[in-house]
Image (spheres, rainbow, N blue to C red):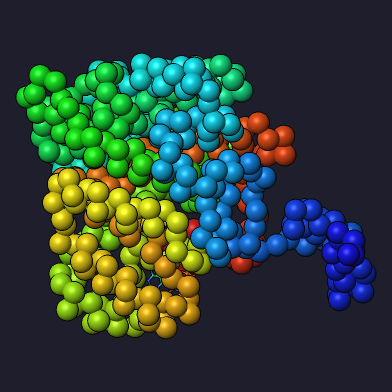
Amino acid sequence: MGKDTLTVTDNRTGKSYELPIRDGTVRAIDLRQIKVSSDDFGLMTYDPAFMNTASCRSRITYIDGDKGILHYRGYPIEQLAERSSFLETAYLLIDGELPSRSQLETFTRNITYHTMVHENIRKFIDGFRYDAHPMGILVSTVGALSTFYPEAKNVFDKESRRTELYRLIAKIPTLAAYAYRHRRGLPYVYPDNDLSYAGNFLSMLFRMTERQYVPNPVLEGVLDVLFILHADHEQNCSASAMRGVGSSQVDPYSATAAACAALYGPLHGGANEAVVRMLNQIGSAGAIPAFIEGVKRGEQKLMGFGHRVYKNYDPRAKVIKRLAYEVFDAVGRSPLIDIALELERIALQDDYFVSRKLYPNVDFYSGIIYQAMGLPMDVFPVLFAIGRMPGWLAQWEEMLDDEEQKIARPRQIYLGSGRRDYVAISERR
Ligand code: ACO
């Protein structure tokens, strides 16, 4: 076994440099010493979209994209989906260890008693147009929470941080449900602290005139598992937004609003909505071959397929596919599942997808379940945001406690104009 170093020769100068390798990584800053002259800035790396750059050291989530493996704090996602609950998984992500019974009870109580939002938030939501996208409402209202909790700016005060963390996990379902009810023109339903996390969310979404809302136990259980499956996914676009914005030491509500905004995009958490729109557009199994040909010609993407990290079946998609049948048994089969299954079958036999290692990701089947549960498409990304909240918070705390981190500030390669003098508007051609 040789030394854990990398020797680089700069052919411009003939000089060689020995750079340390740690954890399979060289530090980009070690390249800065490589210069052609003393006034040269030094070598940088160029990595648009962070294709091969680690931005942090993390102990939260492990993914092996080639093997299709996902662990939270070392625990396989399949075991957590089978045996844990969402709040226990949230505790695990944030604290690093599974809780004892009393730790879980305290954690659950703390979340449960922070589910209400200030009445002004309701009024704020009322101000949105009747057809406002729930994700737009969520981005704004999560950010607005910072104005109710000014102490949240004390991001290095661990006790205050803990309270904000409970508030965020507790209030995001309330905001999400209010956004949905606003869209439907229905009265808002206050949280019911006698229900489970998922049960309370279902109550806030669907309760009408019942004195006591009793959630469907199958839907309650499935939703809890869906939240677990979405709870973290290491340095994805929204977690990177959370870390990047949080690195300015802004309060966690503002950082979470940025993370929600990142999640909203169709290439990220908006994909579940896009999948159902795509399946509706395809319409029938017979139309799949023509659709696939269009994808191969680059006319559209096969939404819910492909992933930056997974080059194998997304382990979350496997669990979700199974959950779909539990939901169908409880509320009836969605016709979209047959189109989705056939689409997956055809795509996984097609060289275009096989050669690019494009497999179903978490969003391929989740939208079908949400739709079967009676939720409209534009609420799907909001459900993703609820599940992802503990992950964002765990990533944010880890970033704040990491002495190697500073304000996130990438470099650029400037390709614009050289210095030039201002020209009066009357003299411009
Ligand atoms: N349909 C058709 N072709 C695809 C797809 C797709 N869904 N995804 C990737 N490809 C093709 C690309 O066109 C590219 O082909 P080329 O080599 O001929 O140019 C090749 O596969 C590699 O794809 P990239 O775009 O380079 O992969 P990248 O890692 O940048 O993108 C992403 C990953 C954004 C997820 C992409 O696969 C995609 O757009 N998928 C559809 C949207 C989606 O499902 N997003 C959810 C992701 S999971 C999540 O956020 C929860």
Q: Residue at x 53, y 35 (%)?
A: 93
Please report the residue visible at 28 percent of the width from the left and 18 percent of the height from the top.
193
The x and y percentages for residue 64 are 57, 58
Instruction: List x then y, in percent, for residue 242.
Output: 50, 40
Residue located 40% across and 35% down the image: 86
Q: Residue furthest right?
A: 15
Q: Is residue 3 left or right of residue 385?
A: right
**Residue 322 visible (yes or no):** yes
Q: Position of residue 36 (x, y in %)?
A: 86, 67
Q: Quadrant of ligand 1?
A: bottom left
Of the 4 image quadrants, the one containing the C terminus is: bottom left
Quarter of the view holding residue 143: top left
Is residue 265 visible in the rendered structure shown here? no
Q: Quadrant of the N terminus?
A: bottom right
Residue 102, compared with residue 303, is above or below; it is above
Image quarter of residue 330: top left
* In front of the other: 137 or 366: 366
Residue 87 versus residue 352: which sits nearer the camera?
87
Question: 13 above or below 229?
Answer: below
Between residue 164 and residue 228, name the one nearer to us: 228
How many marks the image carries: the answer is: 0
Q: Is residue 377 left or right of residue 260?
A: left
- The residue furthest left is 209
Residue 413: x %, y % from top left: 64, 62
Image height of 49 relative to 137, above or below? below
Residue at x 34% of width, y 31% of height: 172
Q: Is residue 313 above or below residue 99?
A: below
Camera-nearest residue between 174 and 332: 332
